[in-house]
Amino acid sequence: MNKRLKSVSTILFALVISTSLVLNGCGTSAPNTPQPAAAKKDTISIAIPSEPSTMDVQFADDGNMRAVADNVIESLLTLDGKTMKVIPALATEVSRIDNTRWDIKLRPNVTFQNGNPFTADDVVYSIKRIINPNFKSNIAGFFATFKDAQKIGDLEVHIITTGPDPSMPTRLTLLDILNQKEMLASPDKIKTAVSGTGPYKIVSWTKGQRIVLERNDNYWGTKPAIKTVNYRFIEEDATRAAALRNGEVDFATNMLPEYVSTLPQVQTAEGLEFSLVRMNAVSGVMKDQKIRQAASYAINWDAISKSLYQGYASIAPGQVLKSSYFGFNKNLKAYPFDLAKAKQLLAEAGYKGETITFVGEQGRWLKDGEQEQAIAQMLRDAGFKVNVKMLAFSQWLGVLFPQDPTSTPPDMIFTFHSNDIYDADRTYSTYVLTTGSASSYPKTLDAQIIAARTELDTTKRQQEYEAISQTLYDNPAWLNGINIKDIDGMGKDVVYQPREDMRLIVSEMSFK
Amino acid sequence: MANSTLVDTDTPELRESRPRFYELHRMTSKMVKDRLALYALIFLMLIFLSAILASIISPHDPTTGDIWNRLKPPSFAGGYSGHLLGTDQLGRDILSRLFYGGRVSLRIGFITVLFSSLVGIFFGLLAGYAGGKTDTIIMGLVDIQFAFPGMLVALVFVMVLGPSELHLTYALAFNGWMVFARMARSLVLTFRDGPLVEAAKAIGAKPLQVMIRHILPNIFAPLVTLFVLEVARIIGAEAMMSFLGYGIQPPSSSWGLMIGEGRAYFPMAWWLIVFPGMMIASTVLALNIFSNWFTTAIDPLQKGQSG
C-alpha cells in the first residue's frame, strides 16, 4: 500500500517538474499593474527585454539603458526622427574653424533636472570624461578622433580633433552631456538616478521591477504629451508579447515577425543592424579569394529574409551600408544565390573539404542562432565542410574583437553590425583596416581607408568609398547579410512611428 | 507470502550463496505483477532503443532543415505527411530531433551519474569505514557543497568553462556526488560493526578489501535505486541548463535545448515545446517508477509484501 502511495507521489513530483519546465517555455506573466482609469490616458507602460545595467550612458553600450536614458539625457546634436538628418539639440551651432578645430555654440537658458544651469563646463567635462583612456568607456570608439575640449565662454566650446574628421557632427549626436556639478558632488548618482536636460526625469528605479520617468516641466523644448513612463523588464519574447496582448503594457519592443498578426498594433522601422559573416582573408582555407566568392554565391538570403524573418528584413545591397549612409555605392548589388557557380568556384580553387570553423553566438539579436544555423547549412549544401562553434556572448566577443592581435581569426564568424554614424568609415575602419578591432583582411586597402577617412572634399571622399566597396565586393571580407527591421508592438491607442536609429523616444509618443 | 519464512532468516552470507537465476525469476515475476513498473520499463526500453537506433529510424536528418517549410504543424494537425510531429523554427523534422535529442539527454544523464556515483560512493565508503577525522572532513565537505544551490554552481561552472557537452557533464557531476557519499556512508555504518566485517577482519582482510569485497556488495541495491533516481534528476537538470543556453549547443540537440530554442514560437507553434516536454516528463516519470519498484523488489525487508 505504502508503495502505491509512493508511486503516486512520484508521478506528481515528476509532473510538477516537467510541467514547470514546459511552463518556463511559455513564460509566466508578471503581476498585473493596475492602470489608472483617467479620462485622458497620460501614463505609458513600456516593456523592454532586460533591465539596464547602469545609467552611466558614457560607459556602457547597452540598448536597454538607451531605451530609458535617451529620454533623460541629451547630446549636443541629435537626429531628426523622420529624416535622420542632424539637427541642433543642446548646441545651436556647430562650425569648423580649421581642419582640427570645431566651434560649438551652446543653447542658452537650459537647466538640468536638478536645477543646475547647463554651461560650457558640462560639455568640457563630458568630453574629457569619455575620451579619458583610464575610464575605458565601451563606446569610446565613436570618439576616437577627439583630442581635447576647451571652454571659450559660458556658452561656447572648442573641440579639437586628431585630424580632419568629416563625420564630427554625427559623432556629436552620440555624445551624452552630463551634469558636471552633480557628477562631482555625488559621483555614484550616474549609476541610477542621473539628472540630465531631457524631457523626462528618473523618478524611481526599483531594481528588478521597474523604472519610472516623469515629465520634466522645465524642459527647454516641446512639452511631450505623455506624463509618466513606466518601464518593465520582460526577458522572454513570448511573455513580452503576451503582456502587450493582455493590456499589461502599452508598448513592447523587439517583437518577432511571427507575433505580428497576434498583436493589437505593430509599427516597424528600417533598423540599423546588418548581419554579416566575416571571413578570414589572411590565413587558412578562406584566404583564397575564390573560396570566399563561392561562399558569397552559396547563401540564399532571399529564403532567410522571406521565410526565417517573414519578410521583415531586406538583403544587403552588396555592402553593409544603406543608401542614406555616406559612402554608399549604388552600382553594387547583392551576390545572387547560385549553387552551381559556388560549386564551380570551389572546384577551381581546389577545395578538398577542409573543415571551415564557423563561430557564432545566440540570443543577442533577433533569430541570430537560427540565421547562423541556416547559413551553415547552405554552406554545406554548396560543398563546404562547416563546423559550427556556438560560443557564449563574452567569448564570442573575444573572438570577434581579439585582445591579442597576433591570434588567428576563425575562418568565419557571424555578427550583426550597426553603423551608428551612418558613414562608411565606421564599418571599414573596424572590419577592414588591419589596425581595426575586428579585421581579418590583408592590408591592401589600408591606405585607401585612411585617405578617405581624412578627406574633407565630400565628392572625392564619396568616390574613394565607392572604390573600397567595389574591391570588397570582388574580394570579399565578409558575406553581406540582411538588414533586419525593428518591430515594435503597441496598444491600439498608441501613436508612434519607430525611428530608423532605433532610439525609443517617448516624447514622440502619444495616445489617440 | 509463501517464502516469507526464508526472508526472515535471510543473512548476507545466505543471500550470496543463493542461485542467481532464482533472484532473477523472483524479480521478473514481481515485475509482471506490478503493471505500472512493467509499463515504465517497456517505455524506458523504447526510449533507449530509439536513442540507439536514431540514425536508422529517423525519417529525416535532424540538423538539415528546409527553411521554406518552417513551423509546419504535425501531420495529424494539418501539416505535411512527411513530418509526423511537424517541423521546427528552421524547418527541421521534430520527430528525428526527438530521437537524436534523446540520445544526448540519456548519454549525459548516465555518464554524469556514473561519474558522480563512483566518486560519491568511494568517499562515502571511506568516510563510513574509517570514521573519525576522515569522516568529519569528508562529510564536512559534503555539507559545505550541499549548502550551495546546485544549479547555480553548475551554471557558474559552465559560464566559466564555456558551454559544451563535456563541461556540462563535469558541472552536473560536480554537484551530484554528495548524495551518493552520504547514502553510502550511512549504509556502511550499519555494516561496519556487524559480524560480517568482524569475520572478514578476523581472517586478515585489508581495509580496502573489506570495503570493496565485503561491504560494497551488501549496500549495492539501495545505491542502484539512487543511481536511477539521479539519472532522472540529471536529465531534468540537463534540460534546464540547455534551456537556459548553458548546456548543449546547436547544431546538436537535446530535449531541453529544443524547448529552449522553440520557446519564442510557443504562441503559434505548440508542437515545438509540447513534444520534447512530454519526452522529458515521461522519461523522468518512468525512471522514478522503475527505481521505486526496484527498491521494493530488491529490498529483503520488503520481499514479502504484495506488489
Image: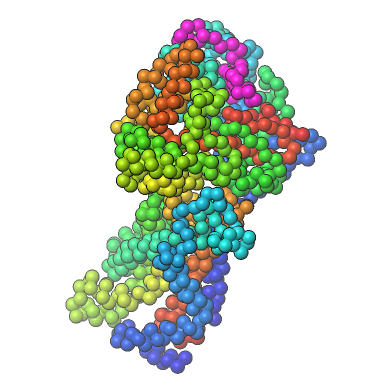
Q: Nearer the viewer, residue B63 or A394?
A: B63
Q: Which residues are magenta?
A: A73-102
Q: Nearer the viewer, residue A141 or A217?
A: A141
Q: Nearer the viewer, residue A143 or A411?
A: A411
A321 horizontally vs A383: left or right: right
Residue at 46% from the left image edge and 84% from the top image edge: B30
Residue at 59% from the left image edge and 62% from the top image edge: B75
> Is A80 part of what is drawn in magenta?
yes
Q: Is residue A64 above or below residue B169?
A: above
For residue B231, say whether it is visible: no
Residue at 56% from the left image edge and 73% from the top image edge: A8
Q: Quadrant of the N terminus of chain A?
A: bottom right
Q: Quadrant of the C terminus of chain A?
A: top right
For residue A485, say whether it is visible: yes
> Is B63 part of what is drawn in magenta?
no
Give the total of numbered labels.
Answer: 0
Name the quadrant containing residue B55: bottom left
Q: Is residue A98 above or below residue A317?
A: above
What percent of the width, then of the height, locates residue B227?
Answer: 40, 68
Name the quadrant containing residue B29: bottom left
B65 horizontally vs A411: left or right: right
What percent of the width, then of the height, locates residue A198?
Answer: 63, 23
Q: How is the image coloured?
A: rainbow
What percent of the width, then of the height, locates residue B304?
Answer: 45, 87
Residue at 69% from the left image edge and 36% from the top image edge: A44
Name the quadrant containing residue A179: top right
Q: Nearer the viewer, residue A151 or B106?
A: B106
B275 horizontally vs B107: left or right: right
What percent of the width, then of the height, locates residue A485?
Answer: 58, 36
